Image: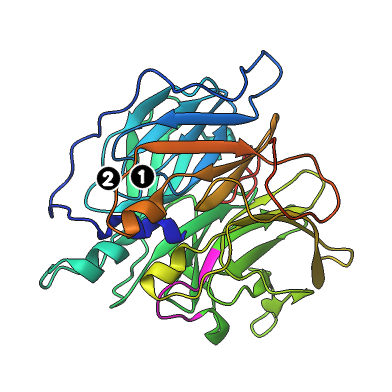
Amino acid sequence: MLASAAVLTAIAPIALPAPALANSPAPAASVAGRHTGPDVINTRAADVYPEGVAWDPTRRAFLVGSALKGTLSVIRLDGTVEELAPSIGMVSTLGVRVDTARNRILVAYSDFWIRQRLEVGDQPPTSGVAVFALDTGKLQRRIDVAQGLPRTFANDLTFDPQGNVYVTDSVSQTLQRIDLAGHVTPVVSDPRFAAQIVGLNGIVWHPDGYLLAVRYDDGRMFKIRPDAPAGRKVAEVDLAEPLVGTDGLGLRPDGSLVVVTNSIGAAVGAPGGVDAVKVVGSRDGWRSASVRSRVDPWPVGGPTTVAVTPYGDYVLSGEVGTVLVGETSDRIVLRRLPCPGPVRHGHSTSSNSTSSKGIIR
């Protein structure tokens, strides 16, 4: 997820204290009932700047990372924000997934943006997956995926029914897999994945047995079959239009893909798109795909990803672009995507199970 660029602000090279969170939610656009969610959740929390989000069915709430502080927090439907896990170090916590079957929260983390602005000496780069207990929020393990690489940027992740985790590295041409024992192995290396700043980003697991992933910089989508023979693992999806600026993805139960794009990359020299949300579908098993509907521009600036929930698809705007240009904000907005309709332009007035950042059970 590109939003990790928020760490470009000054930050001390030590594990950071937990931020002060808002215990009193800001007014939401509507009040959630027992079986519905609000159209908009407007809340505030200092120094969080979430870039990734996932729906947690056990709490009936959202889980978000922190591009600035490396924490994990809960955002409830009434807008209340609570810290679930303290900082895991001088990293950004980015893609978030909930695996209820195994009582775990999976979080991609990296110090990629920090290294662009701070002198770290001979300290090797940090990228990995943090595993937290879903019921308690306790950190269980950190799995290194840097594997000795001179440049690494673990950005997003998803998992398959067997519990294998797949991690995108936005500056590498290699997609990695982590098994339940914590062993890291390359799934495939493909020159089409390589990038200098932000390449391969959002990723989801499709129940038909493959991955879908999109590059941020040029908007190309790839269908990846992890267990296919070498040379046949990766196929580029024929898109009716490139999805430039794609950050997060969310796979809906009907098989369509919610694609969140933004223009944040322009601030760091990466080609960016526009702040928009598109619903993309395929009629041929993702050999090709096209946009079925869109909200362009998205009414809240800097959207980064989406959580597919029983109450609809909620798009996160965590103000990471604000920090990227040297300003500050404590605002966090989760806005529900309108019900599917025709391709549209202009502001929407309304509005994971599956989340941008695989299928959340």
The type of colouring in the image is: rainbow
Q: Is residue 334 above or below residue 306?
A: above
Tag 1 residue: 66
Q: How many marks?
A: 2
Residue at 44% over, 49% down = 51
Left or right of 318? Residue 113 is left
Mark 2: amino acid: Lys
Q: Is residue 213 visible?
A: yes
Which mark is drawn over residue 69?
Answer: 2
Marks 2 and 1, how far apart in space? 5 Å
Q: Is residue 184 magenta?
A: no
Image quadrant in which you'd find residue 143: bottom left
Q: Most prominent secondary structure in the magenta stretch? A: loop
Task: Residue at 74%, 40% (x, y): give it.
Answer: 338
Q: Position of residue 115 (x, y in %)?
A: 23, 67
Mark 1: which amino acid? Ser
Sort mark 1 into few (<14), some (14-19) or many (20+) by Cα contacts within 10 Å. Answer: many
Q: Nearer the viewer, residue 79 or 307?
A: 79
Q: Are marks 2 and 1 in contact (CB under 8 Å)?
A: yes
Q: Is residue 71 above or below residue 7?
A: above
Q: Is residue 205 left or right of residue 84?
A: right
Observer-nearest of 271 and 187? 271
Residue span colored magenta? 194-201
Camera-nearest residue between 36 and 169: 36
Left-right relation of 344 to 59: right
Q: Position of residue 114 (x, y in %)?
A: 24, 62
Residue at 66%, 72% (x, y): give it: 222
Instruction: Point out residue 241 in the picture as x, y percentages from the top left corner.
Output: 74, 74
